[in-house]
Protein backbone atom coordinates (compact mmCIF):
# COMPACT_ATOMS: atom_id res chain seq x y z
CA UNK A 1 0.00 0.00 0.00
CA UNK A 2 1.09 3.53 -0.67
CA UNK A 3 -0.16 7.04 -0.18
CA UNK A 4 -0.71 8.65 -3.55
CA UNK A 5 -0.63 12.34 -4.34
CA UNK A 6 -4.07 13.96 -4.54
CA UNK A 7 -4.40 16.07 -7.68
CA UNK A 8 -5.86 19.54 -7.25
CA UNK A 9 -8.48 21.58 -9.11
CA UNK A 10 -6.98 22.92 -12.33
CA UNK A 11 -5.41 19.58 -13.25
CA UNK A 12 -7.09 18.44 -16.50
CA UNK A 13 -7.38 14.84 -15.22
CA UNK A 14 -10.24 15.98 -12.92
CA UNK A 15 -12.34 17.07 -15.91
CA UNK A 16 -12.17 13.79 -17.80
CA UNK A 17 -14.63 10.92 -18.10
CA UNK A 18 -13.34 7.79 -16.34
CA UNK A 19 -13.32 4.39 -18.04
CA UNK A 20 -15.17 1.39 -16.62
CA UNK A 21 -13.07 -1.12 -14.70
CA UNK A 22 -12.94 -4.34 -16.72
CA UNK A 23 -10.11 -6.24 -15.01
CA UNK A 24 -10.61 -7.30 -11.40
CA UNK A 25 -6.96 -8.02 -10.82
CA UNK A 26 -4.07 -7.23 -8.49
CA UNK A 27 -3.70 -3.77 -10.03
CA UNK A 28 -7.29 -2.88 -9.07
CA UNK A 29 -6.76 -4.25 -5.54
CA UNK A 30 -3.62 -2.08 -5.22
CA UNK A 31 -5.51 0.99 -6.45
CA UNK A 32 -8.35 0.42 -3.95
CA UNK A 33 -5.90 -0.15 -1.08
CA UNK A 34 -3.98 2.99 -2.02
CA UNK A 35 -7.18 5.05 -2.28
CA UNK A 36 -8.15 3.89 1.23
CA UNK A 37 -4.78 4.71 2.71
CA UNK A 38 -4.63 8.09 0.94
CA UNK A 39 -8.15 8.93 2.14
CA UNK A 40 -7.36 7.96 5.74
CA UNK A 41 -4.18 10.05 5.68
CA UNK A 42 -6.04 13.06 4.19
CA UNK A 43 -8.83 12.72 6.76
CA UNK A 44 -11.60 12.94 4.16
CA UNK A 45 -14.95 11.19 3.69
CA UNK A 46 -14.48 10.00 0.14
CA UNK A 47 -11.94 9.70 -2.65
CA UNK A 48 -12.27 8.87 -6.35
CA UNK A 49 -9.61 7.28 -8.57
CA UNK A 50 -9.26 10.38 -10.83
CA UNK A 51 -8.22 12.32 -7.71
CA UNK A 52 -5.03 10.28 -7.70
CA UNK A 53 -4.70 10.63 -11.48
CA UNK A 54 -6.26 7.28 -12.45
CA UNK A 55 -9.11 7.51 -14.98
CA UNK A 56 -11.00 4.44 -13.76
CA UNK A 57 -14.48 4.19 -12.25
CA UNK A 58 -13.55 3.37 -8.66
CA UNK A 59 -14.27 5.32 -5.45
CA UNK A 60 -14.03 4.94 -1.69
CA UNK A 61 -16.82 6.33 0.52
CA UNK A 62 -16.79 6.34 4.32
CA UNK A 63 -20.32 5.76 5.58
CA UNK A 64 -21.95 7.03 8.81
CA UNK A 65 -20.64 3.97 10.68
CA UNK A 66 -17.07 4.83 9.67
CA UNK A 67 -16.80 1.88 7.27
CA UNK A 68 -14.78 2.35 4.08
CA UNK A 69 -16.87 1.19 1.12
CA UNK A 70 -15.15 0.20 -2.10
CA UNK A 71 -17.30 0.97 -5.12
CA UNK A 72 -16.20 -0.16 -8.57
CA UNK A 73 -18.24 0.94 -11.62
CA UNK A 74 -20.84 2.54 -9.30
CA UNK A 75 -24.12 3.96 -10.54
CA UNK A 76 -27.05 5.60 -8.77
CA UNK A 77 -30.16 3.42 -9.13
CA UNK A 78 -32.64 5.49 -7.12
CA UNK A 79 -32.69 8.77 -5.24
CA UNK A 80 -35.18 10.78 -3.22
CA UNK A 81 -35.55 14.00 -1.24
CA UNK A 82 -33.26 17.01 -1.21
CA UNK A 83 -30.67 18.44 1.15
CA UNK A 84 -28.69 21.67 0.94
CA UNK A 85 -25.41 21.69 2.80
CA UNK A 86 -21.76 22.61 2.84
CA UNK A 87 -19.46 20.49 0.75
CA UNK A 88 -15.72 20.35 0.31
CA UNK A 89 -13.26 18.25 -1.66
CA UNK A 90 -9.71 17.00 -1.11
CA UNK A 91 -8.93 18.30 -4.61
CA UNK A 92 -10.21 21.79 -3.69
CA UNK A 93 -8.43 22.31 -0.37
CA UNK A 94 -9.58 25.06 1.98
CA UNK A 95 -12.77 25.91 0.05
CA UNK A 96 -16.39 25.01 0.77
CA UNK A 97 -19.72 25.69 -0.90
CA UNK A 98 -23.42 24.93 -0.53
CA UNK A 99 -24.61 22.14 -2.83
CA UNK A 100 -28.09 20.63 -3.21
CA UNK A 101 -28.04 16.84 -3.23
CA UNK A 102 -30.66 14.10 -2.83
CA UNK A 103 -31.33 13.11 0.77
CA UNK A 104 -31.22 9.39 0.00
CA UNK A 105 -29.62 7.34 -2.77
CA UNK A 106 -29.37 3.68 -3.68
CA UNK A 107 -26.16 2.76 -5.48
CA UNK A 108 -25.21 -0.36 -7.42
CA UNK A 109 -21.52 -1.20 -7.69
CA UNK A 110 -19.03 -4.02 -8.03
CA UNK A 111 -16.56 -5.09 -5.36
CA UNK A 112 -12.87 -5.77 -6.01
CA UNK A 113 -13.73 -9.30 -7.21
CA UNK A 114 -16.35 -8.05 -9.66
CA UNK A 115 -19.43 -9.11 -7.69
CA UNK A 116 -22.34 -6.67 -7.87
CA UNK A 117 -23.98 -5.33 -4.70
CA UNK A 118 -26.35 -2.55 -3.71
CA UNK A 119 -25.85 -0.01 -0.95
CA UNK A 120 -28.01 2.83 0.38
CA UNK A 121 -26.97 6.12 1.92
CA UNK A 122 -28.77 8.94 3.70
CA UNK A 123 -27.75 12.49 4.73
CA UNK A 124 -23.96 12.96 4.59
CA UNK A 125 -23.43 9.48 3.09
CA UNK A 126 -25.89 10.21 0.24
CA UNK A 127 -24.03 13.49 -0.33
CA UNK A 128 -20.72 11.64 -0.35
CA UNK A 129 -21.93 9.02 -2.88
CA UNK A 130 -23.15 11.79 -5.23
CA UNK A 131 -19.95 13.82 -4.82
CA UNK A 132 -17.61 10.88 -5.49
CA UNK A 133 -19.63 9.49 -8.41
CA UNK A 134 -19.63 12.88 -10.13
CA UNK A 135 -15.81 12.83 -10.05
CA UNK A 136 -16.01 9.78 -12.35
CA UNK A 137 -17.79 11.89 -14.97
CA UNK A 138 -15.24 14.68 -14.67
CA UNK A 139 -17.32 17.01 -12.49
CA UNK A 140 -16.41 18.92 -9.33
CA UNK A 141 -18.82 20.17 -6.65
CA UNK A 142 -17.65 23.72 -7.40
CA UNK A 143 -19.69 23.60 -10.64
CA UNK A 144 -22.84 23.27 -8.50
CA UNK A 145 -22.34 26.11 -6.00
CA UNK A 146 -22.96 29.78 -6.47
CA UNK A 147 -20.14 30.83 -4.19
CA UNK A 148 -17.08 29.29 -2.57
CA UNK A 149 -16.07 30.16 0.98
CA UNK A 150 -12.77 29.89 2.82
CA UNK A 151 -12.81 28.55 6.37
CA UNK A 152 -12.21 32.13 7.64
CA UNK A 153 -15.29 33.33 5.73
CA UNK A 154 -17.36 30.47 7.14
CA UNK A 155 -16.21 31.28 10.70
CA UNK A 156 -17.14 34.93 10.14
CA UNK A 157 -20.61 33.90 8.87
CA UNK A 158 -21.22 31.78 11.97
CA UNK A 159 -20.11 34.64 14.23
CA UNK A 160 -22.41 37.08 12.42
CA UNK A 161 -25.35 34.72 12.85
CA UNK A 162 -24.58 34.33 16.54
CA UNK A 163 -24.34 38.11 17.02
CA UNK A 164 -27.68 38.57 15.27
CA UNK A 165 -29.47 36.25 17.68
ZN1 LIG B 1 -14.14 15.51 -4.29
Image (spheres, grey):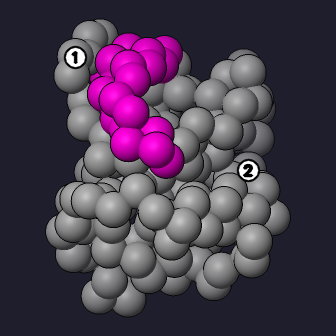
In this view of the protein, which residue sits in the foreground, 165 or 87?
Answer: 87
In this view of the protein, which residue sits in the foreground, 130 or 38?
Answer: 38
Q: Is residue 3 magenta?
A: no
Question: Mark 1 falls on what kind of element?
Answer: strand
**Earlier-in-chain disc, 1 versus 2:** 1
For image coordinates 76% across by 41% down, the residue present is: 159
For image coordinates 32% across by 83% down, the residue present is: 13
Q: Which residues are magenta?
A: 99-122
Task: Single out the mark in the foreground, 1 or 2.
Answer: 1
The part of the image, by quadrant, that contains residue 71 is: top left
- The residue under label 1 is 78
Which quadrant does the N terminus fall into? bottom right
Task: Assign the magenta stretch its main secondary structure.
Answer: strand
Q: x%, y% of residue 16?
A: 21, 75
Q: Is residue 21 above or below residue 83?
A: below
Tell me, for residue 45, which label it has, or none.
none
Q: Is residue 97 above or below residue 71?
A: below
- The residue under label 2 is 155
**What separation in Å lies between label 1 and label 2 (alpha carbons)?**
35 Å
Quick check: can you spot residue 151?
Answer: no
Amino acid sequence: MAIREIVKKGDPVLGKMCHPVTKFDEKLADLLDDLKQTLAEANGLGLAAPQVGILRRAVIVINERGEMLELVNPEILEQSGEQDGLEGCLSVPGMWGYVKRPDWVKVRAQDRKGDWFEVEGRDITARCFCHELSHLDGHLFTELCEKLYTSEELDAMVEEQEEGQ
